[in-house]
Amino acid sequence: MEEQMFGKSVVTNMINRSAENEADRRLFLKSAGVAGLGVVGASALGGAAPAMAAPKGITDGAVLNFALNLEYLEAEFYSYAAFGKGLSDNLTTGKGKRGGVKGGRAVPFATPAIKNYAVEIANDELDHVKFLRKALGGAKVSRPSIDIQGSFTAAATAAGLIKPGETFDPYANEDNFLLAAFVFEDVGVTAYKGAAPLIQNKTYLEAAAGILAVEAYHAGIVRSALYSKGLNEAADAISAARDSLDGKKDLDQGIGTASKANLVPTDKNGVAFSRSAGQVLNVVYLNPKKTTKGGFFPKGVNGVINTSA
């Protein structure tokens, strides 16, 4: 699999040089050749431009690094919840300032199935971090400062799950863990879907689509577990809080009512919705305004995509 996806040494060499600037991207396209990498775009093919081009200066490497920041966050949360420890130091290095992780501990799961869910998801998120870091090579960003304690209290307060001044502990029990996981999972799915049109290299696009599928499976697991426990009102409150952060358009959906489930959030065509990178950052920064830090990333994310909408 690795041979098929990254068999061209020039891919790694280009990424190592820094995939986050346009000059190296053009050099990469010229050096790699179209046939070997499945690259599309007017500059490579001399033909029609893709349906949606990335904003000026935003390369595939920049998009993947944005995704890596989110994967760091998810991997740390799930690893602590499932195993009582976070990422090893050798998986946190890279460009930009490396930060620590505040919070996190093992959850005392009462239901074996839910513990198994947590372990499987934790391992998937760890694999995502490893995969993206390897794909990006020397251009990978380091893990930024992450808060997986106070940020959940802020999110729970905004959702009305707790009163101002109270504390929400996502590691206290499996119900709190599932509600905390719900904060992430739908955001991850919408982030990858929103980023898909920006990725020009078909190899990277296929890989991102694969991660999107996994994140959607995770979201389905969490939404189903919450629904089976009758936590739909709390989940809907979290959904409403997310929606208040990412703009005026109603993008988010809860998990339904006691009489009607809504485990798969889609539009009228049965299609999942998207968030822009800026909207994703609004949610994880826990701020509806334009900013470069806050919430789960108290000092911001690393890489060129770092500002909320």
Image: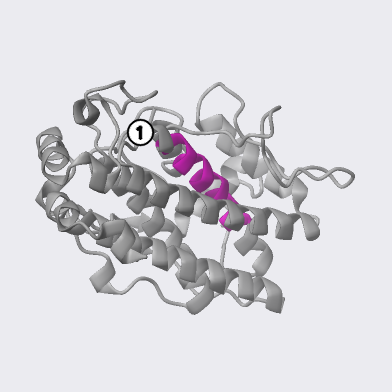
Image quadrant where one finds the C terminus: top left
- Which residue is drawn at the image coordinates 31% and 33% (left, top)? 307
The answer to if 183 sits in the magenta stretch is: yes
177 to the left or right of 97: right
* Magenta extent: 179-195
103 to the left or right of 159: left
241 to the left or right of 146: right
Task: Give how far across and how far down residue 69 sits, in percent.
Answer: 34, 51
The answer to whether residue 299 of the structure is visible from this angle is no
Towards the viewer: 68 or 40: 40
The answer to whether residue 259 of the structure is visible from this angle is yes
Residue type, mark 1 in image: Leu
Where on the picture, by quarter, is residue 20?
top left
Task: Give how far across and how far down residue 66 sits, in percent.
Answer: 32, 45
Task: Give how far across and how far down residue 256 sits, in percent.
Answer: 78, 42
- Which residue is drawn at the image coordinates 46% and 55% (left, top)? 150
Image position of 164 with respect to 250: above or below: below
Image quadrant where one finds the N terminus: bottom left
Mark 1 sits on what residue?
198
- Which residue is drawn at the image coordinates 19% and 58% (left, top)? 137
Image position of 267 with respect to 113: above or below: above
For this orientation, the residue located farthest to the right is 259
- Which residue is drawn at the image coordinates 39% and 35% (left, top)? 277
- The kind of secondary structure element at disc 1 is helix
Where on the picture, by quarter, is residue 71?
bottom left
